[in-house]
Image (tube, rainbow, N blue to C red):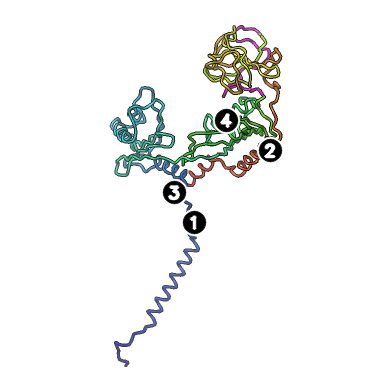
Amino acid sequence: MQEFDPRRPTFRVTPRLAIGLAGLAALAVGWKLAADNPPAQARAPLDPAAITALQHAAFTQSEAQPGFARPQSVPVKVMPGETLESAVERAGVPREEARRAVEMLGEAMDTVHIKAGMAFDAAVARPRGERGPARLIGLSLRTGPAQSITLSRTFDGALRLREMEEKIRDERTVASGEIAGSLYESASRLGANPRIVGEMVKLFSHKIDFDRDLKPGDAFTMVFDRKITESGRTIETGALEYAAIKGVKFYRFERPGGEVQYFDETGKNIKGFLLRTPVDNARMTSRFGMRRHPILGYNRMHQGIDFGAGSGTPVFAAGDGVVVEARRWGGYGNWVRIRHTGGFETGYAHLSRFAKGLRPGQRVAQGQVVAYVGSTGASTGPHLHYEIWLNGKRMNPVGAKAPQGTVLAGGELAAFRAQKARIDAMIKDQGEAPAARLALAQDEASPALRR
């Protein structure tokens, strides 16, 4: 028998073979798992808009506290004469919790001198079984254009205060979409504010009757400058560079001397036209022609068209011209008449008041506020009666042909075409609206929240 020598290394085939086979088996299993479950693609980092969407979702969809159902978001507005504490309590939480929440908010803001209409969102959880008081899970409010404060309850039940301030950047935005509801609602969803939409309405008022011509699904596009927060919220808008509705397009162009005007695709100036709708967001309630007079009770010629609008709504000059009359005129009540070029005149009746300083002989520009809607004279309610006169004779404002404005030529036309080409290229390159990108970011953030 061979003796054991401790100086000579041992070599046993069976253990080493077993280890080797085990290693190969592990490699095979690993390869199989890798083949069946390919590595997940690295997720792109969330942009600021997605982060904000994720924070909002986490605030409103956080895990329920023990004994409470999942919280529900409750929008609240402070009522006239109401304190912030009572507004928080009105969201459905006990007075003590409302008091504590306002005390914490007081560390970051003035909670005493607040204005009626201030809005905030409260996340409130109801007890399971609907017995007992509700619980405030979180509260979020905006304290400035790019500043907000959030209260959120941690897992140990304590409320935590967070202050957030977003960076603001300047950008030129392409907002393109379809009419769903009003133009104001549709454009606001794409980052426009009421001021920039109002400019667009004035721009097209001579060409489009917003009450009759626009239908759901009609396409529109706007190009405008704005100041925007990291989360995509518009806090200020600048110049409207381009606007298009139903195939009609207008481009902003600054002429030598600094005068800004809008031109169509061929370089024709639109300012020579008369507005078809000299009041914002109004509907036509009575047409030109014979009708039964609502007060006198018999058929009578209606010499203009009526637009239903709330009392105090601004009335615009339909075109450049000179104020001929601004006075009380019988059944027309407060009345303004403006003389334009080419023998045209426009009249505005039943006004509540005139614009400050308006007087006969004053020159006005198209779109300038000259008065406000009212119900003076022979009127059954607030509305604007609008007339167009040609050479002293009234004519139907619907379809009235007014003279065209100037047409660009020479060097001005070349400069306009170059600017138009830049706008057209921007619209082509940036067809995806900011609001659509924000919606996409929110969709991408949702899976992260569920993990």
- State the residue position of label 2: 414
Whole-Å distance between the Cαs marked 1 and 3? 14 Å
- State the residue position of label 3: 448
The answer to which image quadrant residue 149 occupies is top left
Q: Earlier in the sequence, mark 1 or mark 2?
A: 1
Q: In this picture, which residue range is highlighted in magenta?
A: 273-298
Q: Earlier in the sequence, mark 3 or mark 4?
A: 4
The answer to which image quadrant residue 199 occupies is top right
- State the residue position of label 1: 41
Front label number (4 vs 2): 2
Question: Which element carries disc 4, helix, strand or loop?
Answer: helix
Residue displayed at 35% across by 37% down: 125
Q: Are marks 1 and 4 in contact (CB under 8 Å)?
A: no
Question: Which element carries disc 2, helix, strand or loop?
Answer: helix
Residue type beneath disc 3: Ala
Front label number (1 vs 2): 2
**Circle 4: is it few (<14), some (14-19), or many (20+) Cα within 10 Å?**
many
Residue type beneath disc 1: Gln
- State the residue position of label 4: 183
